[in-house]
Amino acid sequence: MKDTPLKDGPIIAPVAALAGDPARANMLVALTGGKALTASELANEAGITAQTASSHLAKLETGGLITRVKQGRHAYFRLANPDVALMLETMMGVAARGGHLRTRPGPSDPAMRKARMCYDHLAGEMGVAMLESLVAHGQIANDKDTLTLTRKGEGFLRGFGIDIEMLDSGRRPLCKTCLDWSMRRSHLSGALGGALLDKFYKLDWAKRDRKSRAVIFSPRGEKKFREAFRLS
């Protein structure tokens, strides 16, 4: 008896095909840093011509993975929503576990593994350590990867200058897990994850590396970060 194909639920093949092309995959990964990029910048990331990049970008836009933002005469592209970033980060984790890694690590790789942008929140060693500290100190409850901010956590974050009510009133989940591809453990995403990284920038603890997704903490900033989240 032949197996009958599944007919219920979403069809994932078109999305997988869009993300599976090497050039498009490189462009999508470049956008996981949360920064909107031009077609020429994305062509450079993918190592293809501008004309070829234009065709790929049209497919990604039609497929709902990216969106176009116009500013004056220029057009920029960014990921359509945080779910696309989460899908890509998860795929990178699957690829890493399967041994599909770059054979020649670049100079930014150690910095990327330590701290990097994942759409709009902190990932890497420091992102994972932050979430694990929040859970360990009872500020976030973690029930099988479902995160809930506790009253203790609300007090801590208000003291940190985070407006919980404003974040919780939006459509985006307040806090979610995001599987970190380099650490293979979860870091904090959602509105709270984005707000915390933005706060680190405003406090001048860290800045975004101009040439990669790495987040560079100053010595003072890393010390303050470790003190705030009680990391050894």
Image (cartoon, rainbow, N blue to C red):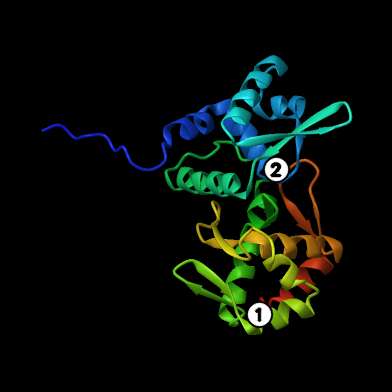
Q: Position of residue 182 (x, y in %)?
A: 55, 53
Three-letter code for the amino acid on which mark 1 is drawn: Gly
* Residue 15: numbered disc: none
**In the rendered image of this protein, does residue 117 appear above or below residue 58?**
below
- Does dot 1 land on a helix, a strand or a loop? helix
Extreme-left residue of the structure: 1
Q: Dot 2 surroundings within 10 Å: few (below 14), some, or many (20 or more)? A: few
Residue 206 figure quarter: bottom right
Q: Earlier in the sequence, mark 1 or mark 2?
A: 2
Asked whether 216 or 203 is in front, the reply is 203
- Does dot 2 land on a helix, a strand or a loop? loop
Asked whether 64 or 159 is in front, the reply is 64
Q: State the residue at coordinates (56%, 79%).
A: 136
Q: State the residue at coordinates (59%, 35%).
A: 64
- In the image, which is nearer the foreground, mark 1 or mark 2? 1
Q: State the residue at coordinates (74%, 63%).
A: 195
Extreme-right residue of the structure: 72
Q: Which residue is mark 1?
A: 153
Three-letter code for the amino acid on which mark 2 is drawn: Pro
Q: Position of residue 158 (x, y in %)?
A: 76, 78
Q: Dot 1 surroundings within 10 Å: few (below 14), some, or many (20 or more)? A: some
Q: Which residue is mark 2?
A: 107
Q: Position of residue 110 (x, y in %)?
A: 66, 51
